């Protein structure tokens, strides 16, 4: 004859183990949070370069042009509409990826 008290405890052991296994994802989520921090830093660096280039900094403009991969035969001496559009799209891309990271972190 089986003990009626031990049977439910043994049956609950598997669901409890499955539920406790969620802690295995902790290092993954910490890694995603670190990636989120890197994206925030990258966003601010690009935004600062955009503002500096808008105020006439040639060094900031050169950094922007190289970071977005804009190729031209002519040396740019100021912001043009194409560079502004590409930088803004790159910033939007960073924000969208960052939002995706937040959804995955919170959803988990």
Image (spheres, rainbow, N blue to C red):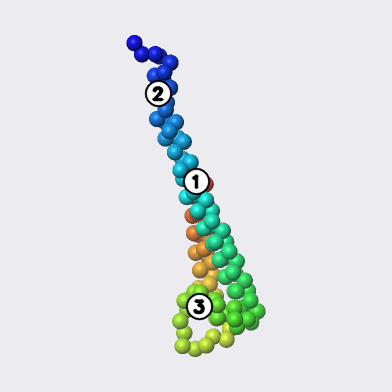
Farthest residue, direction top: 1
Q: Secondary structure at mark 2?
A: helix
Report x, y in % for residue 91. 54, 66
Q: Where 95 sits versus 85, above or below? A: above
Nearer the N terminus, badge 2 or badge 3?
Answer: 2
Rendered image: mark on residue 66: 3
Nearer the N terminus, badge 1 or badge 3?
Answer: 1
Give the class, few, some or many, for how many residues have Cα within 10 Å of label 3's Cα (few <14, many ≥20).
Answer: few
Question: Image point 46% across, 88% down: which residue?
Answer: 73
Q: Which residue is mark 2?
A: 10
Q: Which residue is mark 1?
A: 26
Q: Is residue 85 visible?
A: no
Report how far apart the C-alphas of labels 2 and 3 lie in the structure.
62 Å
Farthest residue, direction left: 1
Q: Where 75 sits versus 3, above or below? A: below
Depth order, front residue of 60/91: 60
Q: Secondary structure at mark 1?
A: helix
Q: Secondary structure at mark 3?
A: helix
Question: In the picture provided, is 43 more to the left or to the right than 14?
Answer: right
User: Mark 2 or mark 3: which is in front?
Assistant: 2
Question: In the picture provided, is 5 more to the left or to the right than 49?
Answer: left
């Amino acid at each position: 004859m089986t003990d009626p008290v031990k049977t439910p405890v043994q049956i609950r052991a598997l669901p409890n183990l499955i539920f406790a296994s969620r802690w295995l994802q902790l290092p993954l989520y910490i890694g995603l949070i670190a990636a989120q921090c890197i994206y925030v830093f990258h966003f601010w660096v690009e935004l600062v370069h955009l503002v500096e280039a808008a105020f006439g900094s040639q060094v900031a403009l050169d950094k922007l042009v190289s970071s977005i991969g804009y190729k031209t035969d002519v040396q740019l001496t100021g912001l043009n509409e194409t560079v502004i559009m590409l930088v803004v799209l790159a910033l939007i891309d960073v924000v969208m990826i960052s939002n995706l990271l937040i959804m995955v972190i919170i959803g988990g």
